[in-house]
Structures are given as C-alpha cells and as structure tokens.
Image (spheres, rainbow, N blue to C red):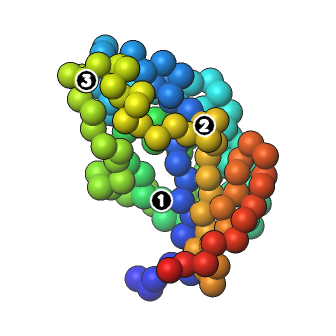
Amino acid sequence: MSAPGRIFMIRHGQSAANADTSIYNRVPDYRIPLTARGVEEARIAGEKLRRRLNGEQVCVYVSPYLRAYQTLEALNLGPLVERVIEEPRLREQDWANFQIAGDIEHAVVPLDRGVLRILEQSRECRIADADQDRRRAVRPG
C-alpha cells in the first residue's frame, strides 16, 4: 500500500457535552452522542467532502468514540469508503466521570461553534469551516 496522496481530517460535530458539560457527570466520554446540530454539521461536511473526492474511494480512520462513528455515518460516504479502521489513538483526552463540570469547561478549548474542519494535506493545507466555508491556507511545517 502506498502513502495517501491526500489526507482529510474531520472532527466530530457538536456533541451533547459541547452543549452541556454536566453530561460528563452521567455518561462516560466515549458514549457521549452528537446533538441534532452535530449530525447536521457532519451531513454538510459530508456533502463538501463527497464533492472534493469526486468518486475517489477512501480509507477511513475513526476513533472508538460514539460521536466519531455518528459523524462518519452522517457524512454519508457510502460506496466511497474502501474500508474503516478504528484507531484508538485518535480519541480525545478521557476526562472520566470524576471531574466537576465547571472544571471541565475551563480546561477544554471550546469549539468554534461546533464547526467541523476538513483538512486536506498536499502541497499546502486548506482548512474549511463547514458553517461559513471560510478558507485559509496553512503551509505544512
């Protein structure tokens, strides 16, 4: 297998914890689902990604978290997915259920309104904001 020509990175959509951090007191981090808004964000990102793929098949790496799988499903890539590989190293930091919700709010860097970002790596990287479709070029280091 050769190295990929392009890499797209998509962060999960808005999760229930993004909307209400007190969920950490009741639900393990890996079981926190997307909100309806998060599903819609993923759906929109999927439309953009499918256009960029233009029929090209992809290998998908996904974290074991529920919200990552929900995002993958909402992307609706269908037959474009050659294979899915669950990769535990892609998961977020696990806060467990022992922290106070207010402490988590101060420790977590807030999402830019739950925006999904699509990062394409080639000669230069482009970050696409799924809400506003703003783009800025970033040169790889």
Q: Secondary structure at mark 3?
A: loop
Amino acid tagged 2: Gly
Number of other residues with Cα within 10 Å of mark 2, as a class: few under 14, some 14 to 19, many 20 or more: some
Q: Secondary structure at mark 2?
A: loop
Which residue appears at 63% of the width and 72% of the height?
A: 138
Number of other residues with Cα within 10 Å of mark 3, as a class: few under 14, some 14 to 19, many 20 or more: few
Disc on res. 107: none
Above or below, comparing residue 14 to residue 62 in the picture: above
Q: Earlier in the sequence, mark 2 or mark 3?
A: 3
Which residue appears at 61% of the width and 46% of the height?
A: 116
Q: Earlier in the sequence, mark 1 or mark 2?
A: 1
Residue placed most toward the observer, 39 or 25: 25
Disc on res. 99: 3
Q: Which residue is mark 1?
A: 60
Percent position of residue 100, x then y: 29, 19
Number of other residues with Cα within 10 Å of mark 1, as a class: few under 14, some 14 to 19, many 20 or more: some
Amino acid tagged 1: Val
Of the 4 image quadrants, the one containing the N terminus is: bottom left
Spatial CA span between label 3 and label 1: 32 Å
Above or below, comparing residue 103 to residue 118 in the picture: above
Q: Is residue 2 left or right of residue 125?
A: left
Amino acid tagged 3: Gln
Disc on res. 114: 2
> Are the two marked residues, 3 and 1, in contact with CB atoms closer than 8 angstroms?
no
Residue placed most toward the observer, 5 or 21: 21
Q: Is residue 76 visible?
A: no
Q: Secondary structure at mark 1?
A: strand
Pair 1/2: label in front: 2
Percent position of residue 75, x then y: 62, 45
Q: Earlier in the sequence, mark 3 or mark 1?
A: 1
